[in-house]
Image: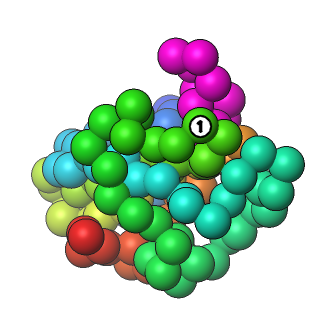
Amino acid sequence: MSLFKKMRSVFHDDWCSQCQNEMDIIHKQLFMLPHVIVGHYQSHEDANYYKQNLVKVNKKKDIPTGTYACGMHEYRCPICGHQAVKLTVFLPVRDEEKVEEVLYFDNGEMDNFRI
């Protein structure tokens, strides 16, 4: 593998950490965190927290005002089959997303998580 490819994969969440190839998005889903409201956000890095607290929604308009949301992107490498999940925690504010945190689970913690 080239050094350039390795360096580039560090800065791209959609690049495989195993073989440094671009991964495919295999699933996207929007969730809300119903118990997390404005002024009460706390950072969580544990995948189990999200597995227990995410509630699936179909559209942003289904999220109550002042409630945090989470976008999930599932990736799979077409070369080696490695999977990863990116969670973007944000607060929907007037047709915009105020991103609080982006979490990347690369060790199978969120693989096959679907509600």
Q: Quadrant of residue 85?
A: bottom left
Type of secondary structure dominating the magenta stretch: strand
Look at 26% across and 43% down and name the residue there. Answer: 58
Image location (x, y in percent) of residue 94 = 59, 17
Look at 46% across and 42% down and name the residue there. Answer: 63
Report the span colored magenta.
Answer: 90-99
Look at 55% across and 59% down and name the residue there. Answer: 33
- Residue 30 as seen in the image, left or right of residue 24: right
Image location (x, y in percent) of residue 68 = 61, 48
Q: Quadrant of residue 10?
A: top right
Question: Visible in this render: residue 29?
Answer: yes
The amino acid pointed to by label 1 is Thr
- Residue 89 as seen in the image, left or right of residue 87: right
- Residue 65 as seen in the image, left or right of residue 98: left
- Quick one: 32 or 80, which is closer to the camera? 32
Q: Is residue 93 magenta?
A: yes
Tell me the crowding category of disc 1: few under 14, some 14 to 19, or many 20 or more residues within 10 angstroms, Cα based.
few
Q: Residue furthest right?
A: 39
Is residue 114 positioned above or below 20 on the image? below
- The residue wearing badge 1 is 65
Look at 39% across and 73% down and name the residue there. Answer: 110
- Quick one: 22 or 65, which is closer to the camera? 65
Image location (x, y in percent) of residue 76 = 23, 56
Q: Quadrant of the C terminus?
A: bottom left
Helix, strand or loop at mark 1: loop
- Residue 89 as seen in the image, left or right of residue 83: right
